[in-house]
Image: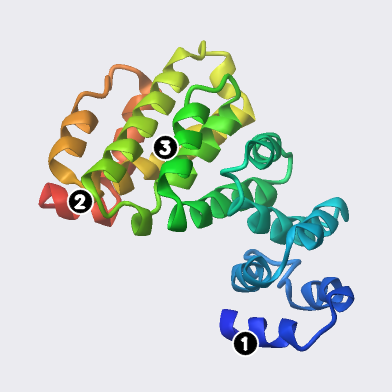
């Protein structure tokens, strides 16, 4: 199965006009897992015009690749605003592409990613908050105390945002999607810097049933169970 290096090579041999057909042939869709390695290769080699074309196509996988591609430019406010809208897209792969693209931004400009996720963590829309927490809670980005603290803070704000929803709203699919992400993101944030992370995690109010579920889910993750000595 070709990896990112092979896909980069294959794309480099082709005219840009042939890229969409190559993406269609190697997307791995329909299927449970889209070809993320190919999307990364497209993001590495493509440009804004190509990404715009892919997003405008309406095809789910092409859009996925285009959104991953523009993520690295999200320090630009117009690009960030575009990703903000895409984070609410009805297609879950497109929403996932927003988080993946923002992580690519964080690889070379963490302060820009930090500004975005702290802003989005207070957004009124649960899917925007979900994008924030999914983007920042990536182990490769959390190598400093400051980065881990940002991840914990985003988790805390998004959890507070969940609790603020009345019981009837919590049944909405968008809110459940945010809750699902909080069910693993806390473990990533805490494991990155355990002492302050565990203090924030322990402070969560487990009398709320959704928060109790979030705590149980994260305690069951290997990365956190190791920290807890389990």
Point out residue 195 in the picture as x, y percentages from the top left corner: 12, 40
> Would you name the residue on which mark 2 appears?
225
Q: Nearer the viewer, mark 3 or mark 1?
A: 1
Q: Earlier in the sequence, mark 2 or mark 1?
A: 1
For the residues labelled 2 and 3, the Cα–Cα distance comes to 16 Å
Residue beneath disc 1: 6
Which residue reaches farthest front? 76
Picture quadrant of residue 196: top left
Q: Would you place residue 158 above or below residue 168 in this image?
A: below
Which residue is identified by label 3?
182
Helix, strand or loop for disc 1: helix
For residue 185, which quarter of the picture?
A: top left
Q: Are marks 3 and 1 in contact (CB under 8 Å)?
A: no
Local SS, label 3? helix
Which residue appears at 37% of the width and 54% of the height?
141
Please tell me which of labels 2 and 3 falls first in the chain: 3
């Amino acid at each position: 199965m070709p990896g990112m290096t092979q896909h980069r090579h294959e794309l480099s041999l082709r005219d840009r006009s042939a890229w969409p057909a190559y993406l269609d042939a190697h997307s791995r869709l329909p299927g449970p897992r889209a070809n993320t390695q190919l999307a990364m290769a497209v993001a590495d080699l493509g440009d804004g015009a190509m990404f715009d074309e892919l997003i405008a196509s309406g095809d789910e996988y092409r859009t996925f690749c285009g959104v991953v591609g523009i993520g690295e430019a999200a320090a630009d406010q117009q690009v960030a605003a575009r990703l903000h809208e895409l984070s609410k897209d009805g297609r879950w792969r497109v929403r996932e592409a927003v988080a993946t693209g923002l992580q690519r931004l964080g690889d070379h400009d963490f302060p820009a990613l930090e500004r975005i996720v702290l802003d989005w963590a207070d957004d009124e829309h649960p899917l925007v908050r979900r994008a924030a927490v999914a983007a920042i809670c990536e182990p490769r980005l959390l190598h400093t105390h400051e980065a881990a603290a940002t991840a914990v803070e985003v988790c805390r704000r998004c959890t507070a945002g969940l609790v603020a929803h009345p019981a009837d709203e919590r049944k909405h699919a968008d809110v459940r999607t945010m809750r699902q992400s909080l069910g693993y993101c806390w473990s990533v944030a805490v494991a990155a810097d355990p002492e302050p992370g565990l203090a924030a995690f322990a402070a969560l109010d487990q009398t709320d049933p959704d928060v109790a579920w979030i705590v149980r889910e994260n305690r069951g993750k290997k990365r956190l169970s190791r920290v807890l000595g389990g």
